[in-house]
Image (cartoon, rainbow, N blue to C red):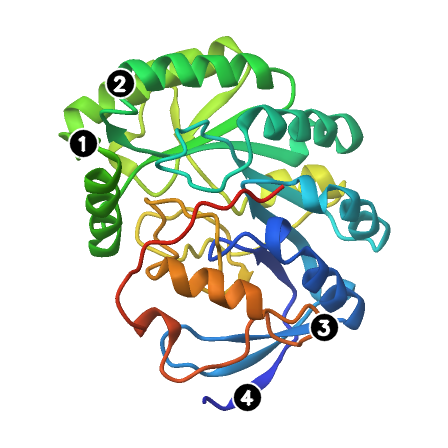
Amino acid sequence: MGFILGCWHKTVIISASYKTDIPTFYGEWFMNRLRAGYCKIVNPYGRQVSRVSLLRHHVQGIVFWTKNLGPFLSKLREVQERGFPFVIQYSINGYPRTLEFSVVDAKRSVEHMKVLAGEYGPRTAVWRYDPIVFSSLTSREFHLANFEKLARSLQGCTDEVTISVAQIYKKTQHNMDWAATEFGFTWEDPTDEVKQVLVKDLAECARAFGMALTVCSQERFVGGIVEEARCIDTGRLSDVAGMPVRAAQKGNRRECACAEARDIGEYDTCPHGCLYCYAVRNRALAQKRYAQHDPAGEFLFPPTDPAPTDSGPDEPFQMVMFE
């Protein structure tokens, strides 16, 4: 177990969270921590513990990341009433269940986006079609038709759609190979030339429905009407806040153009079951940790030793639908 670092008193943007889906699964915990004025997080590498202030005068804004806003939609009003400007990064892929085991139906997510835009304005939401997976279930033709259908449904709800092409990490390859054998499909990682053509076609489609297409952390696909994504975007937060939000550009990985933020999530805690996910190595562990989560705790999940990302081998897990 690590040691506790000092409180984080620099004004920051809070990211909640690219490591897990806080709005879907941990919304009660987040609201409890917001009312308490702080939370504690664990460094995923050194396992040091930090206390992060969630007091309004320490937080410039909040960026939520989710695949299902439904469980958190009613809580956004309190977030706003407490004075926190927020932006929602909303992933809606509409993929087959064999790739996204437990993600809510895309039609439900589209309805959430419409409510979000109606109540808080279209600058509050960014649609993410992310990541793009090439498989026998999700071919180029699938993506063109699926993206257009979703873009048409989301017209007027947002002015931006962010994409990325799936990066095949070792754990991603393991999960994709397992599912391909289990469910009888094939997948591939095509050349950049193939990806580039699809990205340009999607950008043209997005523009037809009033959206700019941006690419997350993959500069080789940027150019023409395809722009670089800033998922933690001070400009968008400033528009939502009605006042300047300032932070240095400090992405969390190479080619990331995001503004500096403090992420309060934890790896291996999201039970959605997306095969391409970089944040979950051991899916059975993620479900187990979700079941053990304490909404009243200071941590999303308390420190453990060894780190969860160094836990045992992957195991298949049941398909469970989270409403």
**Front of the two marks 4 and 2:** 2
Q: Which mark is residue 140?
A: 2
Label 4 sits on residue = 4
Residue located 31% across and 25% down the image? 223
Q: Secondary structure at mark 1?
A: loop
Task: Identify the amino acid type marked 4.
Answer: Ile
Structural distance between the alpha carbons of marks 4 and 2:
48 Å
Q: Earlier in the sequence, mark 4 or mark 2?
A: 4
Which one is in front in this view, the residue at disc 4 or the one at disc 1? Answer: 1
Q: Label 2 vs label 3: CA separation?
A: 45 Å
Marks 4 and 1, how far apart in space? Answer: 46 Å
Cβ–Cβ under 8 Å for marks 2 and 1: no
Would residue 126 appear left or right of 221 to someone viewing this image? right
Residue 296's tag is 3
What numbered label is drawn on residue 166? none
- Please report the residue visible at 21 percent of the width from the left and 52 percent of the height from the top: 174
Looking at the picture, which amino acid does disc 2 mark? Arg
N-term mark: 4 or 1 = 4
Q: Farthest residue toward the top?
A: 208
User: Label 1 vs label 3: CA separation?
Assistant: 43 Å
**Crowding at mark 3 (Cα within 10 Å: few <14, some 14-19, many 20+):** few
Quadrant placement of the C terminus: top right
